[in-house]
Image (tube, rainbow, N blue to C red):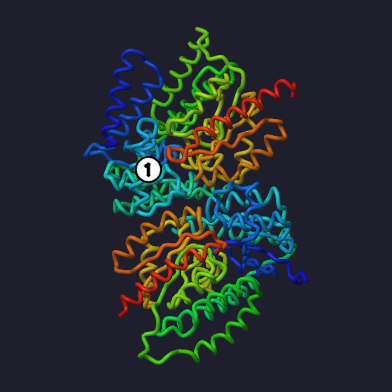
Amino acid sequence: MKNAKPQIGWLCAFAPEEIVMAAGLLPLRLSGDPKELSTADAYIYANSCPYVKSILALGLNGKAKHLDGLVFVRSCDGMRRMYDVWKSYVGTRFVYMLEVPKNKDEAAVEYFAGQLRKFAHALEQEFRVDITPASLNQAIRMTNKARRLMQRIYQIQRNVPLPLPGSEVFQLGLDGLGMTKEAFILRLEEYCKKAESRVPQRGDKGKARVLISGNVIDRPELFRLIEAAGADVVAADLCTARRHFDHLVDENSGDPYLALAHRYLGELSCARMTGLEERLNEMEELVKAYAVDGVVYTSVKFCDQHLFDAPYLVEKLKDEGVPVLFLENDYTWGNIGQLKTRVEAFVEMLETRRR
Amino acid sequence: MLKNFYEQMKEAAEKEFQRRPRAWLMYTIQLTSTLLKAFEDDAKVVWTTYYAFPMELLAAFDVVPFDFEIACNLLPGADPKGCVDIMTKAEAKGYSLDLCSFHRLALGSYFLGYFPKADLLLTSSYFCDGKTKTNQILAQYYGKEAMMLDVPNELSKESVAYVSKQLQGIAGKLEEISGHKLDLDRLQECIRASNRARAAYGRLAELWKTKPFPWDGSRLCNLSIIGNMFSGTPFQEQLYQKILEECEQRMVEGKVAPEEFRVLWLAWFPAQRTNINEILRKHNTSIVMSELARVYWDEVDEKHPFEGMALRCLKNPYVGPVEQRLAGVLQLVDEYKVDGAIHFSTTACRHANASFRLIKDALAKRNIPFLVLDGDMSDERGYPVERTASLLESFVELMSSKEIGGE
């Protein structure tokens, strides 16, 4: 049954859910259907990122009809070109390309704030709604609340041994990307109680601690594979996990659009942005904060942003004495069996180092 | 290695130029001379993107512009095996074969120590993700600053102001690098030179509409990308003027190759040796225009140089929604009376290749045959020689049957 609120799909952590919520609409992160991938080949070049292809295939196969709108951001070459194809061959009611700069200096933040206002205006026009400062501030507070709760869980996961399975925490976050904030907050509050009761006593070294870093993962196969190999996934530096829930929007700013621009552009670290050194520093901080024994860096095939970063980041982390396993994936995780041996060998190596 | 290669290339071109003072040799000499300057100890070397960065700004500072994509992609035509060795170096470091060979070649060249120094690494966001990423990685290795001109997908008053502000910031950085303040008169002179070159190029592009096509179409991409490195210098106008004169001369002397079919070239032209020209020539098929060779920008307003340069960036066919690119393609189809269009899809070029279906459908409405020709810009390992031959021959047949059918 179609939800009462019009549904607006989004595809990238830089899409500001708050504005969609302030318009009285329901923001939903789209997840592609791995079985549909090949349909897209007739419309977008075969060597395009499989996430892009799987999303496009949803649209082409009529499986995105529940959406009243879809927000693209200029994340990468693949996304901006998918926007063109979607507009021409899928035809959702409201298709919007949000300009997100790739720099994060003041000029970029200011320009982005203007783009956010433009986006809000486009939603107002299309859905005949008003986005008032009050409704936007309310959406900001609500989204921050969910972020704070998720961050509390992340904080708990810094404990040794790991209190909660990484796959479970990841799935919790994923679920939150597809429901109302109100429902998500209720679920998070409940989960936090459970999490806090699990904070372990000191003394137990637990299992080898793995950080997963990379781009889009929206199913928990890799987490489960690492867990089955005998390690814990303590944190996920992904656009469907930490990058989505970290950093709050200033709730007391006189200009909520500027506050949003500061949070999204100024704070989020992603391979699409300039600042490779910054990304490396952030990964090193995560390694320390979560007492990480090793990093699994993963990227979907044909993702230039991450495939270019990977060798540099891997090299530098290894120089710091952090073991890294690089895994290229096809988004569908259909090749999970092939990755099993590599993951097991990696976990075994981490265990040996810990002894 | 690269330096020796440019020296040899320059020497050979100079020698040949004594015998035959042709435009292409003049261009080769100027290109290699500029690249060689980057290896001089006292040079201020600014890495950039010739096609996508407003080069007038660099010309106003007398820094040496160095584009790593162009610099190492002069090699594949001369030494394809050597290029594979260079790329292998990057691949051994973990750079995937799914990444563009242009960038694997650049990274390999860096790891092998073939590149000159860099004082600043500039690029623009819209050329492609691969270029910006490679620029950042190289900046990390050099320990120098990487700056990216971020060009949005929308053309508006705000985006012009945003790009213009960034260009002013870059000018500030160039003041530091060059050791002198921006001379506005000098910048305006560079803009005027660029506008004069634009006019000369416009005359040339007009002449190219002539049937049969009076130049070598396989050089169109090269000229439109590398030719831009001279934007803001008097040489650019001289070069276009010289090519124009040579085309006219060839027409007068009746030396133009016979032409049965006229083709519009889309996206890039391979830097490596291929059988494309040979097959097209065999079938009297001329490449009469390239989408990259279209004059897409207006004259830059010298009184508002930063806004003018920003506008030029924002009007690039690869910026903005695909309509900007499609409009350009259709304009060329009409103006150059083409019989078909070929899209060269170098496998890793996500932004150009992704639009193939939209282009195909737009051309189908004009009844223009369209071919997606897969290949690789610089990596001979990925180049399908036989498949290219059979695809091109079938395409010529398709154009031919269309003509017989009287459509």
Q: Nearer the viewer, residue A51 or A244?
A: A51
Query: Which residue is the extreme one toward the top?
Result: B253
Q: Is residue B355 above or below residue A118?
A: above
Q: Quadrant of residue B272?
A: top left
Secondary structure beneath disc 1? helix
Residue B110 pos. (x, y %) = 31, 46
Q: Quadrant of the N terminus of chain B?
A: top left
Q: Kindly identify the residue that appears in the image at 30 percent across and 26 percent down.
A: B10
Q: Is residue B53 above or below residue A37?
A: above
Disc 1: which residue: B105
Query: Which residue is the extreme one toward the right?
Result: A1
Kind of residue indicated by mark 1? Leu
Residue B298 pos. (x, y %) = 55, 33
Q: Quadrant of residue B40?
A: top left
Residue B136 visible to an observer of this rendering: yes
Q: Quadrant of the C terminus of chain B?
A: top right
Q: Kindly identify the residue that appears in the image at 52 percent across and 62 percent down.
A: A335
Q: Nearer the viewer, residue A296 or B366?
A: A296
Residue B280 pos. (x, y %) = 55, 24
**Left or right for A283, reference A82:** left
Give the tally of numbered discs: 1
Q: Nearer the viewer, residue A330 or A275?
A: A330
Q: What chain is tagged by disc 1?
A: B
Q: Is residue A206 above or below residue B142?
A: below
Residue B186 visible to an observer of this rendering: no
